[in-house]
Amino acid sequence: MPAWKGSTWKPPRPEAFVVRNTPGLNAQCVAETALFLMLALAKRLPLHRESFAQRLIGHPPSIELKGKTLGIVGLGASGRALARLARGIGMQVVAIRRHRAADDPDASWVGGAEDLDRLLEQADFVSLQVPLSPETQGLIDGARLARMKPSAYLINVGRGALIDRAALLEALRERRIAGVGLDVFWQEPPDPEDPLLALDNLVATPHIGGVSVEALAQIADRVVALLKEGLL
């Protein structure tokens, strides 16, 4: 309703509302997505179409995850779920979190944020499991990519801006790392013409990491519980 000249009408004040979140309920789904991207890269999935086109069998050879080192950046709920999955197939797990831990059942060692370079130098696979913040934006830049092994793979199930996009594109084109698995992008949905998507050392999924039938059901159940408790 317009406030006519001379009128005493004022717009109503908005009602207060409560905001809740449901942390950790999609952790397993995120972890499985990271593992899927790791397996897809290890089994050279982007190259299979060309093998079929050339009528090649048993090519290209893949690598096994067993015996490889997984570095997890961010040991929250999804990071721990990924650590357990990786250990179950014989991987060694190292991790960093905001603050260093003396001991952890899910990893061989857990460092603090200052140990990121050490993790990058050791890991065969690096999975980013941290939220985007001023401290983590551009966390993986050109210098950090250069610390990774040429045979190593980078996985991102956090947020696109955790990685310097230009530096990643250059590193992939020049084969300075073996490949990347992305569930998140800098612009979402990504441009279908994005040159990253044309690379044969990239595997991508459309931000499905936290979306599963089971996770959505758990979230719905939690919302109903909050309503019954009068917390919403």
Image: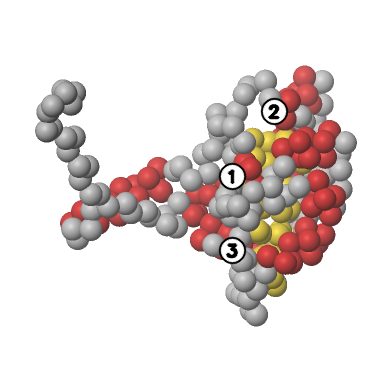
Q: What secondary structure is found at the residue carrying circle 3?
A: loop
> Residue 164's image quarter?
top right
Residue 80 position (above or below residue 48) = below
Residue type marked 3? Leu
Please state if 197 lies on the left or on the right of 104 as rendered: right
Q: What secondary structure is found at the residue carrying circle 1?
A: loop
Residue type marked 2? Leu
**Residue 157 image offset from top left, x and y in percent:** 59, 46
The answer to whether residue 63 shows anywhere in this view is no
Name the residue at 46% across, 42% down: 211
Q: Are marks 3 and 2 in contact (CB under 8 Å)?
A: no
Name the residue at 69% across, 51% down: 139
Residue holding disc 3: 75
**Residue 58 image offset from top left, x and y in percent:** 80, 35
Q: Are marks 2 and 1 in contact (CB under 8 Å)?
A: no
Q: Earlier in the sequence, mark 3 or mark 1?
A: 3
Q: What secondary structure is found at the residue carrying circle 2?
A: helix
* 181 or 53: nearer the viewer: 181
**CA distance for labels 3 and 2:** 28 Å
